[in-house]
Amino acid sequence: MNHVELLKRLLPPVAYDPNAPLLTAELEAEGNALDVAQIAAELILTEADPRTTSFLLPDWERVLGLPDPCAGQLPTVDLRRAAVVSKITQRGGQSRPFFIALAAKLGFIITITEFSQYSVMSPVNAPLCGWPWCFTWQVNAQLNTVRHFSVISGVNEPLSTWGNALLECALGHFKPAHTVVQFAYN
């Protein structure tokens, strides 16, 4: 039942005629406004959930700092909505398994090498690392993008470029602030 009919039922039966033209116009205007308000309230319930949002998706993205500077602008609404849900439900970490899982989520298989300061107790074949290397870790990944200089390259371009910008950006974003991450591609 719409709000117009509900408002007519609220009128005292003796004092007002619900079919009077001016009263009917007033009740229809008020009832239609209440119908619109109810639809908007129901829509807010849908928009409050990031899994079903449409109209408020830009607001969700703004609040969460999306689009991610590493991934860039996503092409579809479903992917944008998934990015919002992922950002809200994401759990951080500083462990090797966290960074390996993060890379796997981006489509990369990596290993991590950690360094320690060389001492008299170190194995003979251990690298000679000083104290600052305790805060450095190395991501070992497959080299997915290699671009070599060619006849169509510009004169100021390097002879070769390589790297995985998405992987480097994401791991650099989540790395502990006191550490240095290096990337080794093979």
Image (spheres, rainbow, N blue to C red):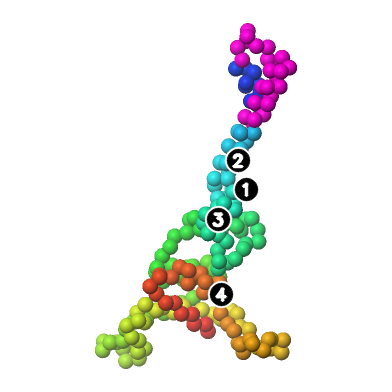
Residue at the extreme front: 22
Mark 4: which secondary structure?
helix
Is-magenta flag for residue 131?
no
Please state, as top left, top right, bottom left or bottom right, where the N terminus lies in the image. top right
Q: CA distance from mark 3 to mark 2?
A: 20 Å
Give the amino acid at mark 2: Leu
Whole-angstrom CA distance, mark 4 to mark 2, is 39 Å
Of residues 31 and 186, the one nearer the viewer is 31
Q: CA distance from mark 3 to mark 4?
A: 23 Å
Q: Name the residue carrying label 3.
A: 62
Amino acid type at image mark 1: Phe
Q: In front of the other: label 3 or label 2?
A: 3
Check disc 1: other Cα within 10 Å, few if <14, some if 14-19, many if 20+.
few
Q: Residues within 10 Å of mark 2 (few under 14, many from 20)?
A: some
Residue drawn where x is 47% and y is 72% of the image: 172
Residue 143 image position (x, y, % from top left): 56, 81
Vertical placement of 58 versus 101: above or below?
Answer: above
Q: Which residue is mark 1?
A: 55
Q: Mark 2 — residue?
A: 43
Q: Are marks 1 and 2 in contact (CB under 8 Å)?
A: yes
Q: Position of residue 60 (x, y in %)?
A: 55, 52
Contact between marks 4 and 2 (CB within 8 A): the answer is: no
Pick whichever of labels 1 and 4 is earlier in the sequence: 1
Whole-angstrom CA distance, mark 1 to mark 2, is 9 Å
What is the C-alpha distance between the residues marked 1 and 3? 13 Å
Magenta extent? 11-35
Residue at position x 64%, y 18% in the image = 8
Q: Main secondary structure of the magenta part?
A: helix
Q: In the rendered structure, which disc, 3 or 4, sits on the residue that comes first in sequence?
A: 3
